[in-house]
Structure formats: C-alpha cells, structure tokens
Amino acid sequence: MISRDTKSDLQSKNRTNSANWATENHLNNPLFLDIQDSIDEAARLIQADPNVVARLKRPKRCIAVSVPVRMDDYSVKVFSGYRVQYNSTLGPFKGGIRYHQDVELGEVVALSALMTFKNSVLGLPLGGGKGGITVDPSKLSRTEKQNLTRRYTSELGDFIGPTKDIPAPDVGTDPQTMAWMMDTYSQEHGSFQPGVVTGKPVEIGGSLGRAGATGLGVIYVAERAFEKKGKTLKGSKLVIQGFGNVGSHAALYGFERGAKIIAVSDVQGGIFNGDGINIPELLQYFKDRKTILDFPKSQKVSNEELLMLDCDALMPCALENQITSKNVEQIKAKMIVEGANGPVDNEATKILHKRGVFIVPDIIANGGGVVVSYFEWVQDIMSFFWDEDEINKRLHGIIIKAFDRSYALSQEKNVDLRAAAMGVSVQRLQGAMLLRGLYPR
Ligand code: NAD
C-alpha cells in the first residue's frame, strides 16, 4: 500500500491501458487513485468481470467551462467550472456542486466516482456526477455569487436536466444556490423545472428533511455501528470535524439522542469540553457570531489536535485527506464515521482496521443527503410531497440496508467495511452494465 503523496509520483507506472494516461493529470488525483485501488480490491472480492472493472475506472464525460462574472466593481472575472458525469448505468448522473478555492478537475473526477459507488451501494436508481467552481465563495458578495451560479448553470446548458444530470449542494453551496440554478434552467427552458436540482428550499419544490439529511444519516449509521460493537450511541463521546451542513446536523442529532459531543471544529479551529458541548446553544452562538470559537465553557483545540482526541467515534465532516499516513499513528478514536467524502485515505484505513478501529466509509455514512435528494426528485416529478416522518423513516430503511449488506460481506470475507461496501456497489453496477452491454460498439 502506498500513500496518496507518493502515489502522485508513481502515477504513470502501472495503470495504463491508455497510451496518454500519464498526461491526463485529472485522472491522477490522489483520492481518485485510492478509489481505483478500492475498485480493484472490490473486484477481487466479488470476482468481477475485468471489462466492467476497466469501464468503472474511467469517467464517462468531463465538462470544463469558463464562467465570466460581472463583479460588483463592474470588472469581469473569469472562473473555472467543471461538471464530471462519471457513470449513468443505473440512472441520471447525480451529485453535488462545490465552490472552493482548491477545486480542480481531478478532485471533481474523484468525487464523481464516489457518487457513482455511493448511489449504487444505496440501491438508488441514479448514476454518479459531481461539479465545482474554483472560487472562495466567502470572498464574493451575494450578487456575485448569484451571477456566478447563473452563468455556470447556463454554460452547462443541456448537459444537465431532470432526466440527465441532477446537481445538489456540496461544500460552499446551499439551498439558495440551488434555487438560482433551478430558476436559470427553468427560464432558459421556458417551463418550471424543479427536478433539475435537489437541495432546493421547500417553497420551490425542495423536500422536508433534506437540509439535515446527511447529518441524520451519519447518526443513523453510527447508531447501527455502535450496536454491532455491543455499545450505544447514547452516552458515547463524539468528536466532529466541520460545522457546516453535515457536521452541525450530525452534532445536533447526536446530541438529541444522548451522545456527548466533546469537540467540534470548523476552518477557523475547534472547541473542546470533556463533559459535552450543548449543541443547540452552540448553534445559536454560531448564528449570532459566525464563529464557534470562544464558546463559553470550552477550551480551544486546533483541527490537528481535534483529530487525535480520545473518543468513541470521530466524525470527520469537512474535507478529504484528513487522516493519512502522516497522522494515523496518533488517532485514538475507537470508531470513525466518514461524514465527509474521502477524509481517511486507503493506507490509513488499512492501518486503522488492523488496529481494530471500525470505519464506516463515506459511501454509506454520508449517503443520507443523496437518499433524500432522490426523494426530492421523485416528489418533484410527481408534484406530490411527503411529510418529514415518512422521509426520515424511508431514509433510515435505505441507509441501514446498505450498511447491513456491506457489514455482512465484510464479515463473510473478513475485510474492512470500505472494501465490502465497494464490493456490494461494484456487484450492482456490474449486473446492470452486463445487461445493458456496450453501445455503440
Ligand atoms: P459546508 O460548506 O456546509 O461545511 C464545511 C465545513 O467544514 C465548514 O464548517 C468549514 O468551516 C469546515 N472546514 C473547511 N475546511 C476545513 C479544514 N481545513 N479543517 C476543518 N474544517 C474545515 O459543507 P458540507 O455540505 O457540510 O460538506 C462537508 C463534507 O461532506 C464534504 O466532504 C462534502 O463533500 C460531504 N458531503 C456533503 C453532503 C451534503 O448534503 N451537504 C452530502 C454528502 C457528503
């Protein structure tokens, strides 16, 4: 097993069935290389067809667009935008849109692959995609963010649509961003098209329960994972990195179910209280001051220290590559539930698994968002909306089924849960790909 850092140096060595592979830098993203290793491992586990495996290792289509934006000072700035449509065997492409200064095509490819395997393991009738713009959204005014979003949507044109590719929020985007996307697409197509994006506000075709769905899913699978280990979420000590959509909801739902949230953090740093942080009070504090720092009865911790705290479950809910060969030896958590996409790399996963640390992988753990996005899409198509209890009940059923199937395979084959979840996912994709065949040949 090689680390993600050294992987980029070895990129052209052993993964070529394409002469120009080494020059296709976007295929050499470290997270994507890890995902390819995971595909190989899953293929060995289920003895997959090599032709299917070769197809699963490449994105179907990568779209790169220039996004010129009229700024508040009347200048025009040009941003880089991407949408990667990885695989549509099981249904329309589906995946979030990220606004972050580090967005690059390779990262979007990796995240679109994760969406493909996530939607498959969850049993959804959806393919995988992901999009993003290289921009720090905190530096934009509301008008600039709206201009950026509308122009990006317009540039994507007919590549997206309710039966083709359905974006959703991710890091740096929110329900308002989705409202602008939906409005732009609808205006350009001359009719109301709520099914083109999910994660919209409820007033314009959004679903009840979508805002908190990813965090709730994290807590549902954590409850199941504790159960498998003969423990309970109630009374357990949780550490949560990231206090955005996923992290703040996971913290709240965990708190409501009696877990002790002993530390949380965001990009500015973290706070710690060994007796547990009062999360509803922290949410109000954050709403008023736009920071979690200096919250009463808490001590400061850095993001690095937070990851190393002793706890029953660590929930990384920020960005990828947080636990790698560089810090894996210092991790004291007994369980890790991946709220973010790709926070623990493959090398660290294997080391932690050997040490008995149970990792619930991203493609199951943060699947709650896309499950309720799927419900939103269905409700938009039917123009018939469900109540929140119904949504949460169905979410629980789907995410626990994916966990249980993967857990059973991990026990049967004696592998970690990431490998097993990928095995279940590749198996379903393989079934559909073989039935559909290759066209044009
Ligand atoms: P968000 O923008 O709402 O929140 C991100 C949080 O991470 C913020 O609190 C931010 O301050 C913090 N953060 C950023 N950089 C950090 C750093 N270096 N160290 C510590 N904290 C940092 O984003 P989100 O929607 O909550 O997404 C978080 C993760 O979950 C991403 O990996 C995303 O792909 C994944 N995810 C999100 C959803 C969803 O429905 N929003 C669904 C599935 C997966």
Image: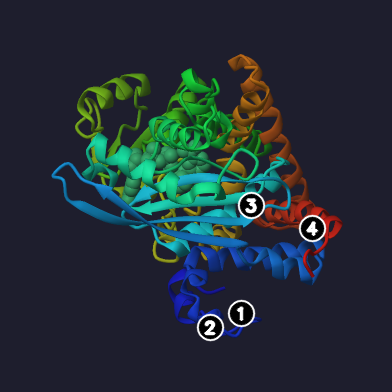
Mark 2 / mark 4, whichever is N-terminal: 2
Residue drawn at x 26%, y 32% is 292
How far is mark 2 from mark 4, CA to CA? 28 Å
Image position of 262 (left or right of 197): left
* Amino acid type at mark 2: Ser
Question: Which label belongs to residue 433?
Answer: 4
Spot occupied by residue 65 in the image (x, y as percentages of width and height): 42, 58
Query: How many marks overall?
Result: 4
Judge whether residue 337 can be spotted in this image: no
Spot occupied by residue 428 in the image (x, y as percentages of width and height): 78, 51
The secondary structure type at the circle numbered 1 is loop
The secondary structure type at the circle numbered 4 is helix
How far is mark 1 from mark 3, CA to CA? 21 Å
* Amino acid type at mark 1: Arg
The secondary structure type at the circle numbered 3 is helix
Mark 4 / mark 1, whichever is N-terminal: 1
Task: Give the camera-side residue of 176 and 301.
Answer: 176
To which residue does mark 1 refer? 15
Mark 4 / mark 3, whichever is N-terminal: 3
Residue drawn at x 73%, y 67% is 53
To which residue does mark 3 refer? 116
Check the image and report above or below for 292 versus 88. above
* Amino acid type at mark 4: Met
In the rendered image, the quadrant that contains the C terminus is bottom right
Q: Are marks 2 and 1 in contact (CB under 8 Å)?
A: yes
Q: Are marks 1 and 3 in contact (CB under 8 Å)?
A: no
Q: Is mark 4 within 8 Å of ligand 1?
A: no
Spot occupied by residue 54 in the image (x, y as percentages of width and height): 71, 70
Tell me if mark 1 has few (under 14), some (14-19) or many (20+) residues whose alpha carbon lies within 10 angstroms of its own.
few
Which numbered mark, 4 or 3, is in the foreground of this view?
4
Task: Give the quadrant of ligand 1.
Answer: top left
